[in-house]
Every structure is written in C-alpha cells, then in structure tokens.
Image (cartoon, grey):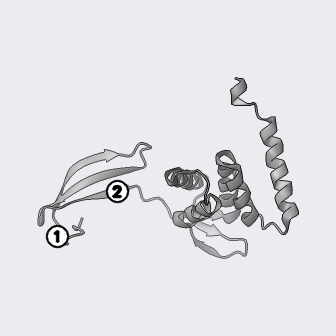
C-alpha cells in the first residue's frame, strides 16, 4: 500500500477491525517513511454486475448511481445519509445473491421501490414517478391511493 502523503511503499497496520456487517475490514496504517497515519478499507472483490437497460444496452452496475437516485427521491426528507447508504448496499448485496453477470434494470428499480416504500412513503412515490414514468397527475394520485390503502390496512403500533 502506498502512503497517500509521501508515496512510500512501506507501512505497517496499527489497527484492524471488521465492519459491523462483516462486509469490509477497516485498517489504520502508519507510513514508515513519513510517520503519518491513514485509513484503508478492504472488501471482497465481487464479480462485476452488468445492468441490462430497457433499450438493451449494458453498463456496469454503479452503487453511486443507485445512491444518487435514492438521494433524489429522499431530498428534504428526514432520512439520514447513512441510512440511504445502507439501503443501497443492501440492494447491491441482494443483486449479487440473485444474479451472476447481468441484472435487468427493472429488478434494481423494483428493489429500490420496495425498500423506499418501507422507509418513507413520499420518497417511494417520488422514485416510482421517475421509475414508472408517470405521465400525468392521475398516475401520482393512483399510486398515492395505493400507498394510503395499504397503510390503512397495517396495524397501528400504538394499538399493540
């Protein structure tokens, strides 16, 4: 590992600990050249997923692109950024479990909508409006009605 400060290729690991979910290892390193410390993250290299888009084109799966879409849906909603990162990472893990090589973009959208529906109804409808390409306000109203009906059928936690 090269030091990000002096570019020396000689360091030692000072501290090492796994993440809470076990998907990566965080390591504190100390450069033997300049003595400065820095952090690295080590994770298993999984096979690259290729996304098959609606028009048949293919591109590499991008966690950043998924996170960007989730962030847009959750704009000005009371949802911590860390929670959205966890959500995106859980979608990525599920895709790796379900697919090897190629994944339809439709599946990514379905997983994102399912998780957003549980997390925040407004964010869910925002995401659905783009993903399902709502044509007019009636599409919004129909989706909102669906969400409201399912919410009214769920037991109220205050009643428990």
Q: Is residue 140 left or right of residue 62?
A: right
Q: Earlier in the sequence, mark 1 or mark 2?
A: 1
Q: Is residue 85 above or below residue 131?
A: above
Count residues near mark 2 (Cα–Cα under 10 Å), then give few for <14, some for 14-19, many for 20+. few
Residue 112 figure quarter = bottom right
Task: Give the alpha-carbon distance from disc 1 to disc 2, as whole Å.
Answer: 19 Å
The one of 25 and 154 positioned closer to us in this rendering: 154
**Can you identify the residue that label 1 sits on?**
8
Q: Are marks 1 and 2 in contact (CB under 8 Å)?
A: no
Q: Residue at x 11, y 66 (%)?
A: 33
Q: Residue at x 62, y 57 (%)?
A: 74
Count residues near mark 1 (Cα–Cα under 10 Å), then give few for <14, some for 14-19, many for 20+. some
Q: Quadrant of the C terminus?
A: top right
Q: Is residue 151 left or right of residue 119?
A: right
Which residue is outermost to the top? 160
Res. 93 mark: none
Q: Is residue 90 left or right of residue 24?
A: right
Q: Residue at x 75, y 30 (%)?
A: 155
Horizontal and vertical percent position of residue 59: 59, 73
Horizontal and vertical percent position of residue 81: 51, 55
Res. 41 mark: 2
Q: Is residue 154 left or right of residue 15?
A: right
Q: Provide the secondary structure element on which disc 2 rests.
A: strand
Residue 149 figure quarter = top right
Q: Residue at x 70, y 74 (%)?
A: 56
Q: Is residue 4 above or below residue 113?
A: below
Horizontal and vertical percent position of residue 117: 70, 49
Looking at the rendered structure, the number of numbered marks drawn on it comes to: 2
Q: Quadrant of the N terminus?
A: bottom left
The one of 25 and 139 positioned closer to us in this rendering: 139
Horizontal and vertical percent position of residue 115: 65, 49
Q: Provide the secondary structure element on which disc 1 rests.
A: loop
């Amino acid at each position: 590992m090269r030091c990000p400060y002096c570019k020396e290729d000689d360091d030692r690991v000072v501290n090492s600990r796994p993440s809470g979910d076990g998907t990566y290892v965080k390591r504190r390193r100390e450069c033997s050249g300049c003595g400065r410390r820095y952090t690295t993250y080590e994770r298993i290299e999984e096979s690259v997923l290729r996304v098959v888009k609606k028009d048949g084109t293919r591109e590499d799966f991008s966690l950043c692109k998924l996170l960007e879409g989730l962030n847009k849906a959750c704009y000005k909603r009371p949802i911590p950024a860390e929670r959205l990162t966890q959500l995106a990472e859980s979608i990525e893990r599920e895709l790796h479990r379900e697919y090897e090589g190629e994944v339809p973009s439709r599946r990514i959208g379905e997983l994102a909508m399912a998780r957003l529906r549980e997390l925040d109804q407004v964010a869910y409808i925002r995401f659905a409006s783009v993903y399902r390409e709502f044509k007019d306000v009636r599409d919004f109203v129909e989706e909102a009605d669906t969400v409201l009906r399912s919410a009214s059928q769920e037991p109220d936690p205050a009643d428990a």
